[in-house]
Image (spheres, rainbow, N blue to C red):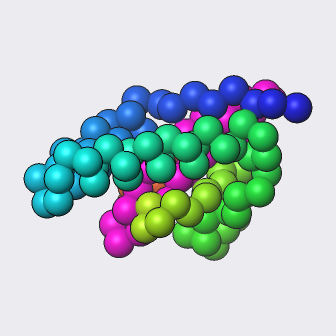
Amino acid sequence: MRHEILLLENAIKDLEVIYQSLKQRASREVALREIEGLESACASLAENPSRGSVPHELERINIFEYRQIISKSFRIIYQVVGNNVFVFGILHGKRNIQDLLRQRLSF
């Protein structure tokens, strides 16, 4: 069964921030390649969204309904609901993930 991928507002903002940051630090081409890779990783969830793991920050507090996949140094945080995959964020692995998840997932 193919799932529909829905990037929520925060995930879209994350992509914009990543693009602008890479464009300033490297080049437009590097930024575009990274964004294309992240978008491709998100799209790959349409075929098999259950392959991701539960983020360990959430597992420690017994929250198991969210998953993540890793694309280079980024964590794509999402939830599967029926035939939909909701992408909550695309976060650099060096960021304080626990606080960000708490803010975005409202727990």
Residue 18 x, y percent position in the rendering? 28, 49
User: What's the residue at 43%, 67% (across, down)?
Assistant: 73
Report the number of numbered marks: 0
User: What's the residue at 74%, 46% (across, down)?
Assistant: 49
Residue 68 x, y percent position in the rendering? 61, 57
Is 71 or 95 nearer to us in this picture?
71
Residue 31 falls left or right of residue 98: left
Quadrant housing the N terminus: top right
User: What's the residue at 61%, 58% (across, down)?
Assistant: 69
User: What's the residue at 57%, 48% (across, down)?
Assistant: 41
Residue 74 x, y percent position in the rendering? 44, 61
- The span picked out in magenta is 75-96
Residue 89 x, y percent position in the rendering? 46, 46
- Does residue 28 appear in this view? yes
Whether 36 is drawn above or below 76: the answer is above
Is 58 or 83 nearer to us in this picture?
83
Q: Is 69 within the magenta?
A: no
- Does residue 106 appear in this view? no
Q: Is 85 within the magenta?
A: yes
